[in-house]
Amino acid sequence: MKNLDDFEEEIYKCSRCGLCQTVCPVYKVTLNECSVSRTKFNMLNGIIKGDLSLNKRILEYMDMCLGCNACKEFCPSNIDAREIFTAVKAQYYKQHHTVFSSYFLFKTILLSAKYGLLLYRFLKFDKITEFLSGKTKSKLLKRILLANTLARKNATEKIKAEIQKEKTKKAVYFKGCFNKYLNNDSETAVKNIFLNTDIELIEPDFECCGISHLSSGYEKEFVKLAKHNLKLIPKDCDYIITDCASCAYVLKSYDKYVSSNIKDRIVSVLDLLKNAKITVKDRPLTITAHKPCHDESGFIELIKKIKNAIYIEAENFDKCCGFSGKFAIAHSDISREISKRKAQDFLKTGAGIILTNCPACKLGINQGFIELGNKKPQVLNVIEFIAKYCTVEF
């Protein structure tokens, strides 16, 4: 990973015009100039010149970022703020050890969440919290209600193939932490749909893609995860697929940190459905969509082609949902307000189903509706929607 000094020219290119201010979702909520890229670049320029030191306070400002890169898309100089802030955090943690960088701790939290949700489902706490939600506006209860979206599982009907196709291709399925530990609805949907194809799914026991460690600047642990996952990928596979936009983004980033030859084989599950004929069963359904910050699949075009699906584009459909993993914990108030504004945009469409292809974004959108207190539409991964409501012809 590059050091701060490697970005000196990039940071110098920033004209401090303030255009990033107009698109930064964090600034729109906080009106805090320190959340904007141009101000952070001023801080980093001071470090490069030796006028400032890279301390914990400056690190906190680097962390006040969703990593959505909206500022890059709007920047006249096309400066990649996300890459720079990640490198700065990595440089800080090379000098300051933190226990939170441990993958063992991260995995322990995931396992605790997994068994906690199993108990939550078994004791029917989801029904209890929903009943109480109409009686109180407690912030704690709102956070617990978000667990309901993980505890509730959508039934995904198996798609029956008239003719079982011979498997002539191999795809390694990277299902990600969400499927592995929290809710495997989209994993079930992927497996059901691929019964109908000539593609054999291979499921190595992958660890997390490492997005949390990468975005936090925990470079050493991230590289360990990348090396572990790369060892499990057969050389003769045709595809490496995932149903998560963030996982796809990180897997494609591996070759920046570890020597690999997988980038050209990484595709979204949705990429393999682009030539399929997809039809909503029974009755037309009104849908809208949220495009995750990491999405490169172009899934919006895919869902527009689904027969009997009426697509209504939401305002700001391609703007950050405000969740972004650790950000939702460290900056809960900001995260919830951004999600709330997203939910308001979705309500205006009148759609009964909101589609996305990132599990964290599902949480972000659900978080927004919990904040509004409205009865929310269904929020589904696109692949869940196809498996549950559609027929697919390859």
Image (spheres, helix red, strand yellow):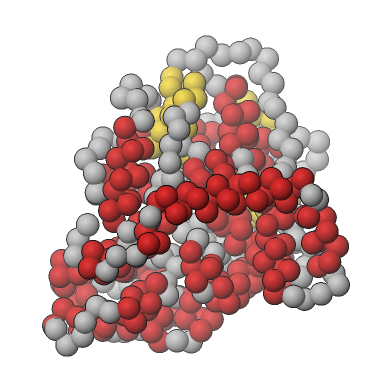
Is residue 196 toward the left or the right of residue 16 in the image? right
Q: Is residue 50 above or below residue 345?
A: below
Is residue 249 toward the left or the right of residue 129 in the image? left
Q: Is residue 377 above or below residue 198?
A: below
Q: What residue is drawn where x is 67% and y is 35%?
A: 387
Horizontal and vertical percent position of residue 268: 47, 40
Q: Nearer the viewer, residue 15 or 105?
A: 105
Is residue 117 toward the left or the right of residue 173 in the image? right
The image quadrant that residue 290 belongs to is bottom right
Q: What residue is drawn where x is 19% and y is 61%?
A: 2
Q: What residue is drawn where x is 60% and y is 69%?
A: 339
Q: What residue is drawn where x is 54% and y is 81%?
A: 29
Horizontal and vertical percent position of residue 205: 45, 33
Residue 343 visible here: no
Horizontal and vertical percent position of residue 323: 54, 64
Horizontal and vertical percent position of residue 171: 44, 27
The image quadrant that residue 134 belongs to is bottom right
